[in-house]
Image (cartoon, rainbow, N blue to C red):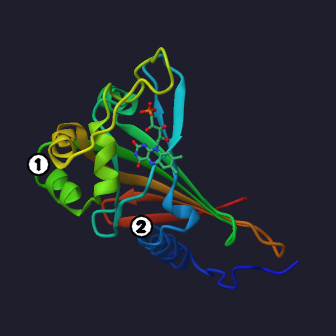
């Protein structure tokens, strides 16, 4: 079987740089599998909750990941109660899994929110004007309304939030016939501390 990804990071620093590069590319490439990670939060009922979101930004300096969500969604109440969040990414073609453990901060009325809303496309903004809010029980599947004019779409901004997640630890797993590779990185005062692990 062919190895779809010829680049095999040799050192821990190569791996870290590769992970950062993949996350940066994932933001821009809407067709990348890494563009839509799964995020997990602790539910208010104690069960872990996992769902897909769109990766909107990766900041390699602050080492944060950003996604957007509706303030009325369950995940917001969950993150307010417990800001710990986990991300799982898998690029099927490259056979690379990236996991991130992070702490989330919700931005709903500040410069981070402003910049995120301004950069959002109209087709994305529409979702935030849905009535009733996401997760509301409905008698009928069609018993909800999306805004249909600019004023109604603008009103949805009240529910828009950008969630910035500060990465505390990263894990990399590369599946390959010649031998899988796995490494874990943790944030320290000096930078990133890496460790090879048995895959
Ligand atoms: C491809 C895809 C992308 C999605 N992107 C987002 C997103 O960026 N933000 C979001 O809040 N929900 C997004 N969703 C919907 C979530 O997976 C989830 O169903 C919704 O946010 C409700 O989650 P919650 O009730 O746990 O808060 C996306 C779903 C899919 C399938």
| Residue 110 badge | 1
x 74%, y 79%: residue: 4
Q: Residue furthest left?
A: 110
Q: Which SS class for mark 1?
A: loop
x 61%, y 80%: residue: 9
What residue does disc 2 label? 27
| Residue 138 badge | none
Query: Depth check: 120 or 90 in front?
Result: 120
Whole-percent x, y for residue 119 in the image? 23, 63
> Is residue 18 shown above or below 146?
below
Quarter of the image containing the N terminus?
Answer: bottom right
> Is residue 101 shown above or below 98?
above
For the residues labelled 1 and 2, say whether their Cβ atoms are less than 8 Å apart. Answer: no
| In the image, the residue with mark 1 has its CB under 8 Å from the nearest atom of ligand 1 | no
User: In screen coordinates, is 105 left or right of 37?
Assistant: left
x 78%, y 80%: residue: 3
Query: Depth check: 187 or 109 in front?
Result: 109
Query: Depth check: 164 or 170 in front?
Result: 164
x 29%, y 69%: residue: 61
Q: Residue furthest bottom?
A: 6
Circle 1 Cα neighbour tier, 10 Å, few/some/many (<14 / 14–19 / ≥20): few
Going from the N terminus, do you reach mark 1 or mark 2 first?
A: 2
User: In screen coordinates, is 184 left or right of 95?
Assistant: left
User: In screen coordinates, is 163 left or right of 88?
Assistant: left
Q: Residue furthest right?
A: 1
């Amino acid at each position: 079987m062919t190895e779809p990804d010829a680049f095999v990071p040799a050192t821990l620093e190569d791996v870290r740089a590769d992970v950062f590069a993949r996350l940066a590319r994932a933001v821009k490439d809407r067709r990348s599998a890494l563009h839509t990670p799964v995020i997990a939060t602790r539910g208010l009922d104690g069960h872990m909750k996992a769902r897909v979101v769109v990766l909107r930004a990766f900041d390699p300096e602050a080492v944060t990941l950003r996604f957007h969500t509706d303030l009325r969604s369950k995940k917001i109440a969950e993150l307010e109660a417990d800001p710990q969040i986990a991300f799982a990414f898998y690029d099927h073609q490259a056979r690379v899994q990236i996991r991130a453990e992070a702490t989330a901060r919700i931005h709903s009325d500040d410069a981070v929110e402003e910049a995120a809303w301004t950069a959002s496309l109209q087709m994305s903004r529409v979702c935030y004007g849905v009535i009733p809010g996401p997760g509301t029980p409905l008698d009928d599947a069609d018993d909800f309304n999306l805004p249909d004019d600019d004023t109604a779409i603008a009103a949805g901004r009240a529910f828009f939030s950008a969630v910035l997640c500060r990465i505390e630890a990263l894990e990399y797993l590369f599946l390959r016939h010649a031998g899988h590779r796995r490494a874990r990185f943790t944030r320290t005062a000096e930078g990133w501390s890496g460790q090879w692990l048995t895959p």
